[in-house]
Image (spheres, rainbow, N blue to C red):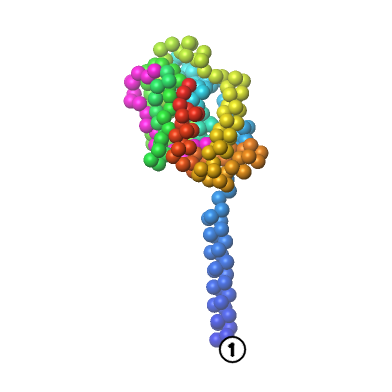
């Protein structure tokens, strides 16, 4: 009788352990996707935006902070490193100024103005993921002293014009991912089609060709 009781106890313990482990595995496998509507993207007042998804904040000194916008921070997924041109380097509008790296691949961003690099954010070099959490304040990447700031900002977007542009970019990106999704993740297509939402960090899961197309179509020109 005692032996049967001990055996039953052991079987119950094994069953409970199995059920617990099974539940844990389900939790590990199931990672709900965060979806974003157009209202999820931040567009602060007073900032200028280029059509290559860099922003510019004009300082009282006439210099400007430069970084990537919230659209990039939300669709990118993760950042492993940021490679920036050297301090003191002269840059021209439309030329490469920094690269964001994700594993073995990278996105090259263009300078929104012509001028000289006068500062680089040390926090970005140490913690590049800051641009994902706080792209507009602590996530500034570098400071530039423009040659002619007045003429430079005329060609950038601000206020309601920037807002309209961003909404169109989100729509364009949704269509882009829906078009490319069958090549790397067929399950994404219906998700994007239903309700027109963008999945946060979706670029982290795309294939190399889609990554290159994104760079060309969304940040390849001002």
Q: Quadrant of the N terminus?
A: bottom right
Element marked by disc 1 = loop
Q: Residue at x 40, y 22 (%)?
A: 95
Q: Position of residue 99 (x, y in %)?
A: 40, 31
Vertical comparison of 138 with 88: above or below: below
Q: Is residue 78 magenta?
A: yes
Question: Among all residues in the image, which is located at the extreme right?
Answer: 195
Q: Can residue 137 be seen from the camera position used here?
A: no
Quarter occupied by residue 127: top left
| Residue that appears at 50% across and 27% down | 53
In terms of image quadrants, where is residue 113? Answer: top left
Q: Which residue is mark 1?
A: 1
Tag count in the figure? 1
Residue 169 appears anywhere in the view: yes
Q: Position of residue 56 (x, y in %)?
A: 49, 21
User: Dot 1, crowdedness within 10 Å: few (<14), some or many (≥20)?
Assistant: few
The residue segment tinted magenta is 75-92
């Amino acid at each position: 009788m005692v032996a049967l009781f001990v055996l039953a106890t052991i079987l119950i313990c094994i069953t409970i352990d199995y059920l617990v482990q099974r539940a844990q595995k389900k939790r590990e496998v199931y990672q709900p996707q965060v979806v974003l509507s157009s209202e999820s993207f931040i567009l602060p007042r007073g900032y200028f935006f280029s059509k290559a998804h860099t922003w510019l904040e004009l300082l009282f000194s006439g210099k400007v902070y430069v970084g990537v916008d919230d659209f990039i921070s939300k669709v990118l997924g993760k950042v492993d490193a940021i490679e920036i041109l050297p301090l003191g380097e002269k840059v021209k509008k439309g030329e490469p100024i920094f690269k964001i790296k994700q594993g073995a691949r990278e996105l090259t961003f263009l300078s929104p103005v012509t001028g000289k690099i006068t500062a680089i954010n040390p926090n970005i070099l140490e913690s590049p993921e800051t641009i994902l959490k706080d792209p507009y304040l602590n996530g500034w990447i570098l400071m530039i002293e423009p040659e002619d700031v007045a003429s430079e900002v005329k060609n950038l977007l601000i206020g309601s014009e920037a807002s309209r542009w961003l909404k169109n970019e989100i729509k364009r990106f949704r269509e882009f991912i829906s078009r490319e999704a069958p090549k790397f993740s067929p399950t994404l297509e219906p998700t994007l089609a239903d309700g027109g939402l963008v999945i946060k960090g979706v670029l982290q899961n795309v294939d190399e060709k889609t990554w290159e197309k994104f760079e060309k179509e969304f940040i390849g020109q001002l």
